[in-house]
Image (cartoon, rainbow, N blue to C red):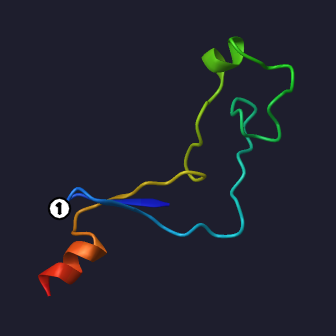
Amino acid sequence: VRNVYLRCGHAETLVSTPEQIMCESRTCKFSVHHPPTCVPPRCTETCWQYRQYPEQYSPNLDRLCPSCCQRRK
């Protein structure tokens, strides 16, 4: 998870949990269901090349980041 703070423009990557959320889609190159025969260049045209939600999650929060909040105190 990477929080993006809209009021100050900063972003903060949160510590990862030990468990990883795995993609189940055949069209995701990170999935255990992605066929081994699907290779570039076709794979780059038909399959996800980066992690999708919920494996990668970046909420946009309408507030200041924790560091900016501390500086204002």
Image quadrant holding the C terminus, namely bottom left
Task: Please give left or right for residue 24 compared with residue 70 in the image.
Answer: right
Q: Residue at x 68, y 11 (%)?
A: 41
Q: Position of residue 27 (x, y in %)?
A: 70, 29
Q: Residue furthest right?
A: 36
Q: In the image, what residue occupies the spot 22% across and 57% down?
A: 6
Task: Relative to 5, say whether 32 is above or below.
Answer: above
Using residue 71 as the reference point, say whether residue 57 is left or right of it.
right
Which residue in the protein does label 1 denote?
A: 7
Residue in view at x 22 percent, y 69 percent: 64
**Which quarter of the picture shows residue 28?**
top right
Classify 10 Å Cα crowding around label 1: few (below 14), some (14-19), many (20 and above): few
Front-lying residue, 39 or 21: 39
- Residue 58: image quadrant is bottom left
Amino acid on which disc 1 is placed: Arg
Q: Single out the residue that lies furthest toward the left.
A: 72
Position of 41 compared to 13: left or right?
right
Q: Position of residue 51 (x, y in %)?
A: 59, 42
Rendered position, 14 above or below 54: below
The secondary structure type at the circle numbered 1 is: loop
Q: Is residue 72 left or right of residue 45?
A: left
| Residue with the most extreme top position | 41
- What residue is at 72 percent from the left and 51 percent from the top? 22
Q: Position of residue 20 (x, y in %)?
A: 70, 60
